Image: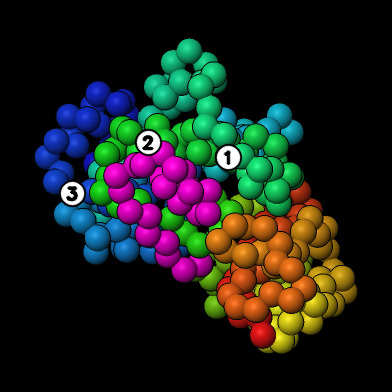
Amino acid sequence: MARVARTVSEFRRARRELGTVAFVPTMGALHEGHIALVNRAALLAESVVVSIFVNPLQFGEKEDLGRYPRDLEGDLNKLPEKVLVFAPDAEELYPEGDSETRISAGAAGETFEGASRPGHFDGMLTVVAKLFNIVEPQFAVFGQKDAQQVFLVRRMVRDLNFDLEIDVVETVREPDGLALSSRNRFLSGAERSDSLALSRALRAAQSAATSRNSAMDAARGILDSARGIDLDYFELVDPKSFRPIASGFKGEATAIVAAKLGSTRLIDNAPVVIG
């Protein structure tokens, strides 16, 4: 079982003994995707720190903060003993209630996931900045599955001159293509089967990417005929700006998709080379 610190002062005492640190921020409910991040972190620095914190700032009023899975003991048992876990409660990080000081994700934080979840990325960046200041890592490791989050964190690190390097690990998938997510446990058997349309659409876009329009048409053909999919968006974006690519775009884009299956919202993405 991994070691755990529950307060900032307790963590900072333990941090003095760690040397260089690679940091993996999580909201818990750990799965093999998270473990891939931890394994990558172990290659980057002398010590690995994992945070487990369900951040209330990034959940809207109608979102599933209370439903989000929590199992601290189970999470600790999944991590190597040498990992130091920082697992504060909300009162520890926000002793006066929700922080009035926020980091703005800007216009890029209001599109796609940000449009569907207003304020989500401001809350995410605020807690990530707090955690960077507490943990003081040399590296921070994120998963590519949350592509918009990765874009915004990288931009924040650059814009605010954080002295650390962001490392990104490829999306970990089930053998049938479903991207691993803590929310997958909420899918019924039928919804689990229906969810495979998301990864099929991404592969269709990759295979038909002679142009933006052909890639979009191939993906939408899969999604429009899929059973049980309540599509939020499918788009091809420029990874340098996270804005939709133009029809004449050539080069590497990122295909992003989000949909609801029943009450469970899933996201996924994949690289697509256009032209």
- Lower sequence index among marks 1 and 3: 3
User: Between residues 162 and 118, which one lies in front from this camera angle?
Assistant: 162
Inspect the magenta stretch and tell me whether residue 153 lies in it. yes
Q: Amino acid at mark 1?
A: Ala
Q: Is residue 132 shown left or right of residue 256? A: left
Residue drawn where x is 14% and y is 36% of the image:
16
Q: Amino acid at mark 3?
A: Thr
The residue indicated by pointer 1 is 105
| Mark number displayed over residue 131 | 2
Residue drawn where x is 74% and y is 76% of the image:
248
SS at mark 2? Answer: helix
In the image, is residue 128 above or below residue 274? above
SS at mark 1? Answer: loop
Picture quarter containing residue 180? bottom right
Residue drawn where x is 33% and y is 57% of the image:
38
Picture quarter containing residue 10? top left
- Lower sequence index among marks 1 and 2: 1
